[in-house]
Image: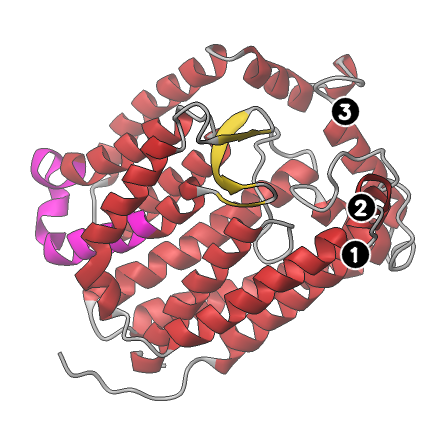
């Protein structure tokens, strides 16, 4: 299929680089105390994040120049590989356990998280399926159930690790894609009731998840246990005020807020750069969402549109959950903030996803 090709969306490209730059600065600022104490190197996490950022940007630029239809061609194989990795990671002695979840494959400190890459694999495969079966999606049996079955299988395997946060982002993204494809709202209402019941069951099956819910409702009921993170996060955000305490001047990063360079990096950013700094980051994500929607609307075919919707939906959902958790509006889930939080797998995936989005923009009617 021949498609007109032009320059990529430079607004999206510059916004991504801006978020990435802020992320590198904040990873160093948030982690210097912990890195100095644990590794005797204040730049330990920053150097690793810079490495993954460098590799990720190179990969993003490469993928930006690869026709996005390549993902359609290889989506089934990529999905199968990701399913195999999800099986391998569950094998005792092979999968690495961190934070109570067997979610990692690798050697030593360098490792990958297969569940992160499953999100992109599922988006690509579902975009292909929806573009080929859009007329059938209005049917509950012939369209909706087949598309959701594979998603729920992947979700179930991710929950065996367990990793509710990553699984929830994947499911939310896929549901958004199916909704945009034209699925009936009445079907979603019925499935939503089943989903809520299942979600309650997942929470009830694990005591630590129940504690997260109770600590969300009243973190002071267990201030040294399940409520500790959110309390320390709010202690960081509050003193930041309008302008912040100044870059590098956070107090909560000095062993009050656990692992501040990962899931709660937005709290340190708000403490150091204040409301203005936090708002600026949110505006950048808003610009990214705007450009993603424009690309999805202007894509030359259904596959490109659904692929763009999936990518921007994944980023938006992850941002909303992370900031919601950090500000105490949602229970703790362990979701990273795209482009800002420390983590090689998450950062690489996001840059790959933006690379695909940039390639779609090269063919879109903007």
**Residue 152 drawn above or below residue 302:** above
CA separation in Å, label 2 and label 1: 7 Å
Mark 2 or mark 3: name the one nearer the start of the chain: 2
Q: Are marks 2 and 3 in contact (CB under 8 Å)?
A: no
**Residue 250 drawn above or below residue 18:** above
Circle 2 sits on which residue? 35
Q: Dot 1, how many residues are within 10 Å of its Cα: few (below 14), some (14-19), or many (20+)?
A: some
Circle 3 sits on which residue? 228
Mark 1 or mark 3: name the one nearer the start of the chain: 1
Q: Are marks 2 and 1 in contact (CB under 8 Å)?
A: yes
Name the residue: 16% across, 58% down: 131
- Estimate the x, y position of residue 31 in percent, counting from the top left: 78, 48
- Estimate the x, y position of residue 365 in percent, counting from the top left: 31, 81
Is label 3 in a helix, a strand or a loop? helix
Mark 2 or mark 1: name the one nearer the start of the chain: 2
Is label 2 in a helix, a strand or a loop? helix
Q: Is residue 240 magenta?
A: no
Side of 66 relative to 38 (left or right) = left
Which labelled disc corresponds to residue 43?
A: 1
Which labelled disc corresponds to residue 78?
A: none
Side of 206 relative to 249 (left or right) = left
Q: Dot 2, how many residues are within 10 Å of its Cα: few (below 14), some (14-19), or many (20+)?
A: some
What is the magenta range? 121-144
- Estimate the x, y position of residue 78 in percent, counting from the top left: 26, 52
CA separation in Å, label 1 and label 3: 26 Å
In the figure, residue 124 lies in which quadrant? bottom left
């Amino acid at each position: 299929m021949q498609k007109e090709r032009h320059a990529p969306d430079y607004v999206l490209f510059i916004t991504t680089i801006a978020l990435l730059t802020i992320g590198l600065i904040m990873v160093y600022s948030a982690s210097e105390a912990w890195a100095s104490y644990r590794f005797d190197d204040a730049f330990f996490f920053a150097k690793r994040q810079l490495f993954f950022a460098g590799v990720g940007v190179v990969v993003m630029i490469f993928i930006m120049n690869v026709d996005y239809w390549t993902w359609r061609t290889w989506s089934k194989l990529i999905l199968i590989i990701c399913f195999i990795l999800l099986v391998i990671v569950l094998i005792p002695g092979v999968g690495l356990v961190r934070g109570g979840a067997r979610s990692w494959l690798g050697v030593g400190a360098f490792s990958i998280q297969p569940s992160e890459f499953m999100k992109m694999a599922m988006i690509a495969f579902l975009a292909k399926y929806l573009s080929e079966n859009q007329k059938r999606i209005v049917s509950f049996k012939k369209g909706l159930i087949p598309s959701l079955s594979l998603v729920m299988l992947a979700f179930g395997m991710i929950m065996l690790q367990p990793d509710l946060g990553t699984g929830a982002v994947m499911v939310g993204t896929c549901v958004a894609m199916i909704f945009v494809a034209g699925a009936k709202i009445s079907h979603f209402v019925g499935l939503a009731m089943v989903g809520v019941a299942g979600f309650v069951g997942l929470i009830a099956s694990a005591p630590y998840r129940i504690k997260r819910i109770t600590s969300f409702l009243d973190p002071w009921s267990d201030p040294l246990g399940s409520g500790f993170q959110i309390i320390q996060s709010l202690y960081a955000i509050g003193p930041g005020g309008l302008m912040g305490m100044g870059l590098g001047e956070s107090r909560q990063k000095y062993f009050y807020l656990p692992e501040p360079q990962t899931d709660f990096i937005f709290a340190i950013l708000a403490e150091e750069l204040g409301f203005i700094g936090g708002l600026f980051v949110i505006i950048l994500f808003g610009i990214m969402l705007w450009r993603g929607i424009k690309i999805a609307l202007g894509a030359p075919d259904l596959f490109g549109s659904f692929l763009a919707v999936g990518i921007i939906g994944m980023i938006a959902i992850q941002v909303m959950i992370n900031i919601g958790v950090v500000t105490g509006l949602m229970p703790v889930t362990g979701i990273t903030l795209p482009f800002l939080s420390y983590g090689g797998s998450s950062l690489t995936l996001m840059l790959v996803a933006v690379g695909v989005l940039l390639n779609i923009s090269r063919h879109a009617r903007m």
